[in-house]
């Protein structure tokens, strides 16, 4: 009889425990399955252009590297002109290098403070030599500038254009300050790669 008296309270407690657990489980908000949106667009090949500058000052026969090579910014107008060149419209090649003592940005359409022959003969925009570097999409445009300015002039930025004046600015960037005197030379290498 004692066992019979124990079964009813134990079952009551067990039933209460089960009801409590059920009530607790029902109070938990239903979790939503995690969903992930998957793009259905096809993966397309894309072209990314990069440009960097290496500069060297030559004074009295000694070549002085002007810091490490610097990454440039490819301008929006430069990218648009590249598309024009690729898809059949007339556009000139980007083989002209300009020098400046001011900096610009990716939205620049001109090289701010570009040095002209009025400022200093020998440091104005000039056509460079195109060198194919033997790799896929790796080209260097190089020019050797010789200053004939009587006084010092500072050069600290450069741009790559498709015309000897005006034209489209493809890329621009800063170099370490080069204080140029008469007969000093400056080598500028714009290397353009794409991937």
Image: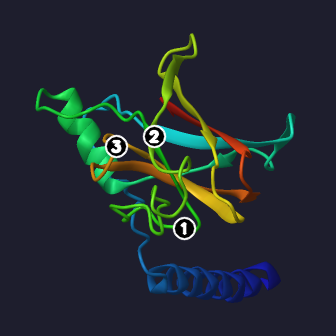
Question: Which quadrant holds residue 157?
Answer: bottom right
Q: Residue 191's spot in the image, x, y percent?
A: 56, 33
Write the residue at 58% across / 16% down: 133
Tell me, yes or no, if residue 40 can be seen here: no
Q: Nearer the viewer, mark 3 or mark 1?
A: 3
- Number of residues whose C-alpha sits closer than 10 Å to that of mark 1, classed few (under 14), some (14–19) or many (20 or more): some
Q: Residue 185's spot in the image, x, y percent?
A: 70, 42
Q: Name the residue carrying label 1.
A: 103
Mark 1 or mark 3, which is nearer the start of the sequence?
1
Distance, label 3 to label 2, CA atoms, is 6 Å
Distance, label 2 to label 1, CA atoms, is 19 Å
Mark 2 or mark 3, which is nearer the start of the sequence?
2
Write the residue at 64% across / 42% down: 146
Image quarter hosting the N terminus: bottom right
Q: Secondary structure at mark 2?
A: strand
Q: Secondary structure at mark 1?
A: loop
Which labelled disc corresponds to residue 72?
A: none
Q: Is residue 138 left or right of residue 169?
A: right
Q: Name the residue carrying label 3.
A: 164
Q: Nearer the viewer, mark 2 or mark 1?
A: 2
Q: Name the residue carrying label 2.
A: 126
Asked whether the beta carbons under mark 3 and mark 2 sit within 8 Å of each other, the answer is yes
Q: Residue furthest front?
A: 150
Write the residue at 79% across / 49% down: 66
């Amino acid at each position: 009889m004692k066992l019979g008296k124990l079964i009813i309270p134990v079952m009551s407690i067990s039933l209460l425990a089960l009801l409590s657990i059920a009530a607790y489980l029902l109070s938990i908000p239903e979790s939503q399955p995690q969903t992930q949106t998957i793009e259905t667009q096809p993966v397309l090949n894309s072209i990314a252009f990069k440009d960097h500058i290496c500069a060297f000052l030559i004074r009295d026969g000694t070549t002085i590297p002007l810091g490490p090579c610097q990454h440039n910014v490819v301008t929006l107008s430069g990218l648009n002109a590249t598309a024009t060149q690729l898809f059949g419209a007339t556009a000139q090649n980007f083989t002209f290098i300009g020098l400046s003592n001011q900096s610009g940005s990716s939205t620049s359409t001109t090289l701010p403070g570009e040095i002209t022959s009025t400022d200093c003969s020998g440091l104005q925009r000039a056509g460079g030599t195109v060198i194919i570097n033997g790799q896929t999409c790796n080209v260097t445009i190089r020019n050797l500038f010789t200053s004939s300015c009587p006084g010092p002039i500072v050069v600290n930025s450069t741009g790559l254009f498709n015309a000897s004046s005006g034209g489209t600015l493809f890329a621009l960037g800063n170099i370490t300050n080069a204080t140029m005197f008469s007969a000093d030379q400056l080598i500028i290498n714009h290397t353009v790669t794409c991937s």
